[in-house]
């Protein structure tokens, strides 16, 4: 599933999940983005059971490639309604990073959140099967798991730390297989979740029901009253 968004930036957080935690992080990111005065980078965010792939919408350069097993939380921010954010463990160290994106409207922010939650559900099931396969000596086809289409479903489901990421990163060496590092990260993050099998999203049941009734056309259609003000952060 592909979404066209605008990248706001990143900040470090102390915990892997939490509505208040993410809200405070988004507030810092938005403040830093405003202070910079720079135009927001247009990005394409692709969600699959493997994770989140972020590319520059204009150059198609890879910006970030985040394994689903490192993501611990995602949400549509309550205060900044059109902001989607996720928390993930860095692939380089144990730091927890909160990344935020500006959507055309809150409906899209909710749709992205639910899509990531669904991808996590699929990945968790794969993780369980892979653990069993290792125990029994059976091998799995990793590619087959990534081919299932995603759609939103029920998800019972100005310092260096706040600086936006570089415009493009060379992540060609990312390993998607469930290696020991990913296994450890996923197991540790799973312990922090309310339900280890479900990604915490911070969405209410009403939010989930509303987002489920939308089509991709609805997600991409900006609010007429604020469509021209996104870069001015009038959200």
Image (cartoon, grey):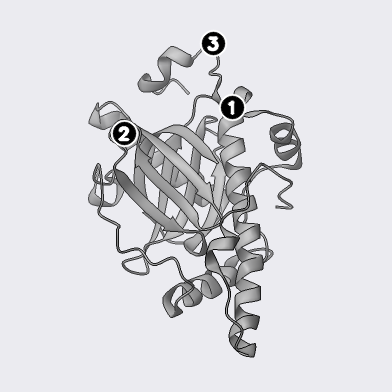
Disc 2 + disc 1, Cβ < 8 Å:
no
Real-space Cα distance between discs 2 and 1? 24 Å
Disc 3 + disc 2, Cβ < 8 Å:
no
Q: Secondary structure at mark 2?
A: helix
Q: Secondary structure at mark 1?
A: helix
Real-space Cα distance between discs 1 and 3? 13 Å
- Residue 200 vs 59, above or below: the answer is below
**Residue receiving disc 1:** 219
Front-lying residue, 54 or 149: 149
Q: Position of residue 221 (x, y in %)?
A: 56, 19
Does residue 113 appear to the left or right of 179 in the view shown? right
Residue for point 39% across, 54% down: 65
Disc 1 + disc 3, Cβ < 8 Å:
no
Real-space Cα distance between discs 3 and 2? 23 Å
**Residue receiving disc 3:** 224
- Residue 16 seen in render: no
Q: Quadrant of the N terminus?
A: top right
Q: Secondary structure at mark 3?
A: loop
Q: Earlier in the sequence, mark 2 or mark 1?
A: 2
Residue for point 39% across, 67% down: 175
Residue for point 36% across, 42% down: 55
Does residue 152 appear to the left or right of 186 in the view shown? right
**Residue receiving disc 2:** 33
Does residue 215 appear to the left or right of 112 in the view shown? right
- Residue 92 seen in render: yes
Front-lying residue, 128 or 70: 128
Q: Nearer the viewer, mark 3 or mark 2?
A: 3
Q: Nearer the viewer, mark 1 or mark 3?
A: 1
Q: Earlier in the sequence, mark 3 or mark 2?
A: 2
């Amino acid at each position: 599933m592909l979404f066209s968004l605008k990248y706001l930036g990143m900040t470090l957080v102390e915990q892997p999940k939490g509505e208040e935690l993410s809200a405070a992080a988004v507030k810092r990111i938005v403040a830093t983005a405003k202070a910079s005065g720079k135009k927001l980078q247009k990005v394409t965010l692709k969600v699959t059971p493997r994770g989140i792939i972020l590319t520059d919408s204009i150059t198609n350069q890879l910006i970030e490639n985040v394994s689903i097993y490192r993501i611990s939380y995602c949400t549509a921010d309550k205060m900044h309604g059109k902001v989607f954010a996720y928390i993930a463990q860095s692939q380089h160290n144990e730091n927890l990073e909160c990344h935020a994106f500006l959507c055309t409207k809150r409906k899209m922010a909710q749709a992205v959140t639910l899509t990531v939650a669904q991808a996590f559900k699929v990945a968790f099931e794969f993780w369980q099967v892979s653990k069993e396969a290792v125990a029994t000596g059976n091998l799995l086809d990793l590619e087959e798991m990534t081919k299932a289409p995603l759609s939103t479903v029920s998800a019972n489901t100005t310092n260096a730390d706040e600086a936006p990421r570089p415009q493009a990163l060379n992540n060609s060496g990312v390993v998607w297989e469930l290696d020991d590092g990913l296994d450890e990260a996923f197991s540790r993050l799973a312990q922090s979740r309310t339900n280890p099998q479900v990604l915490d999203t911070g969405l209410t049941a009403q939010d989930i029901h509303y987002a489920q009734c939308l089509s991709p056309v609805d997600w991409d259609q900006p609010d007429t009253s604020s469509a021209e003000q996104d870069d001015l952060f009038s959200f």
